[in-house]
């Protein structure tokens, strides 16, 4: 399982963070999952100001199918728009991308459930709803057996049907902005209610670690005034909380772990390289450790703020310089080093 977190800093800026752990069956862990990926094709990003990512949790293959469907639709619609040659026509709003994501998720859900039902009974959901199907000889077969009908109903509605767990246990956050530059986030779920929810708060979280992240985000958001929540969150302070929530999910949920992937959005920028930035591997690990060290009282908040600002946003110092500064900020670097390596310290 996983955690995917998103936080809005201002009208035009925000960030996302996820872990990289995937559990294979009940016994294996893989630390290389790419859970947040761009869904706007490169040629569109380079032509207009348009960024959107899909951060999924659940079955990796299902998330890939949904992302593929979104990209294909955006490509087709972009080609259609360009063929019309209307100079002032806008492409898609980010809200329309949310809707496309929801529609593609619904298609994938129905397709996989149909495949399972057809594998069991040689008919699909449509046949079940109309009450009959035709066999290979073209003969009409009525679907009348009570036990069979109850089983199909359970598969469709995820009721005592572990066969479809891998379908229903999928959810995602889509985040990004369109030509207006306004950063937005929404959550989608494949559970029986098949929800699409545009975020009404400054944060959103999905995955097995979302219960832990939710507590941290809620505590932080409730400490802010309404005016602050509407677009005046300091980006460094917000990043510290985003990392704190992801650290919390990793600590309290065995399905979350590994290095983090951090994504930055800035709708005020026109250059694709500046309006969407990914931070991963050693730099994201150092960022998570800085926040972890602060909340376990090894370094002060001023040091934390300065280090995160430099590491995530300013980038004027090398990794080695920042790592040395981090260690120097601790009053007991030996003890902190042991703590960060997983030892119990007192």
Image (spheres, rainbow, N blue to C red):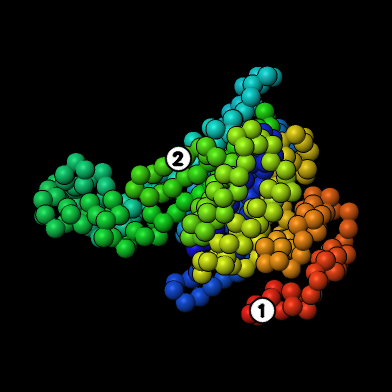
Q: Quadrant of the C terminus?
A: bottom right
Tag shown at residue 346 = 1
Residue drawn at (65%, 53%) of the image: 241
Q: Earlier in the sequence, mark 2 or mark 1?
A: 2
Residue drawn at (39%, 44%) of the image: 194
Specify the quadrant of the image occupied by residue 11: top right
Residue 228, above or below 221: above
Nearer to us in this view, 33 or 279: 279
Could you tell me residue 218's position as x and y percent?
54, 48
Mark 1 surroundings: few (<14), some (14-19) or many (≥20) residues within 10 A: few
Residue 333, above or below 80: below
Could you tell me residue 29's position as x and y percent?
54, 73
What is the spatial separation of the Cα atoms under label 2 and label 1, in whole angstroms?
46 Å
Residue drawn at (73%, 45%) of the image: 235
Could you tell me residue 319's position as x and y percent?
84, 63
Q: Which residue is mark 2?
A: 196
Nearer to us in this view, 230 or 152: 230
Residue 93, above or below 273: above
Compared across the picture, whether 305 is left or right of 11 comes to: right
Nearer to us in this view, 16 or 72: 16
Helix, strand or loop at label 2? It is: strand
Specify the quadrant of the image occupied by residue 280: bottom right
């Amino acid at each position: 399982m996983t955690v995917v977190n998103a936080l809005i800093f201002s009208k035009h800026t925000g960030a996302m963070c996820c872990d990289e752990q995937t559990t294979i069956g009940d016994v294996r862990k893989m630390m290389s999952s790419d859970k947040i990926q761009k869904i706007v094709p490169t040629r569109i990003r380079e032509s207009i100001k348009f960024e959107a990512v899909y951060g999924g949790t659940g079955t990796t293959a299902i998330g890939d199918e949904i992302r593929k469907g979104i990209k294909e639709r955006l490509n087709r619609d972009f080609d259609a728009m360009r063929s019309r040659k209307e100079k002032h026509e806008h492409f898609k709003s980010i809200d329309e991308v949310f809707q496309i994501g929801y529609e593609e998720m619904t298609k994938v859900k129905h397709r996989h459930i149909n495949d399972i039902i057809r594998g069991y009974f040689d008919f699909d959901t449509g046949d079940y709803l109309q009450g009959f199907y035709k066999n290979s000889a073209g003969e009409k077969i009525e679907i009348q057996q009570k036990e069979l009908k109850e089983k199909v109903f359970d598969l469709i509605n995820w009721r005592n049907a572990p066969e479809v767990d891998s379908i229903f246990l999928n959810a995602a956050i889509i985040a990004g902005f369109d030509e207006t530059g306004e950063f937005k986030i929404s959550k989608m779920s494949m559970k029986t209610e098949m929800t699409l929810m545009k975020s009404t708060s400054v944060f959103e979280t999905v995955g097995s670690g979302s219960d832990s992240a939710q507590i941290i985000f809620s505590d932080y958001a409730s400490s802010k005034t309404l005016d602050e929540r509407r677009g005046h969150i300091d980006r460094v302070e917000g990043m510290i909380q985003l990392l704190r929530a992801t650290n919390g999910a990793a600590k309290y949920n065995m399905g979350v772990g590994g290095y983090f992937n951090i994504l930055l959005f800035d709708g005020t920028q026109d250059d694709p390289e500046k309006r969407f930035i990914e931070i991963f591997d050693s730099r994201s690990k150092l960022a998570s450790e800085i926040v972890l060290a602060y909340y376990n009282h090894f370094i002060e908040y001023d040091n934390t703020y300065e280090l995160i600002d430099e590491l995530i946003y300013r980038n004027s110092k090398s990794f080695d310089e920042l790592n040395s500064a981090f260690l120097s900020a601790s009053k007991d670097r030996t003890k902190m080093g042991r703590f960060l390596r997983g030892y119990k310290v007192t």
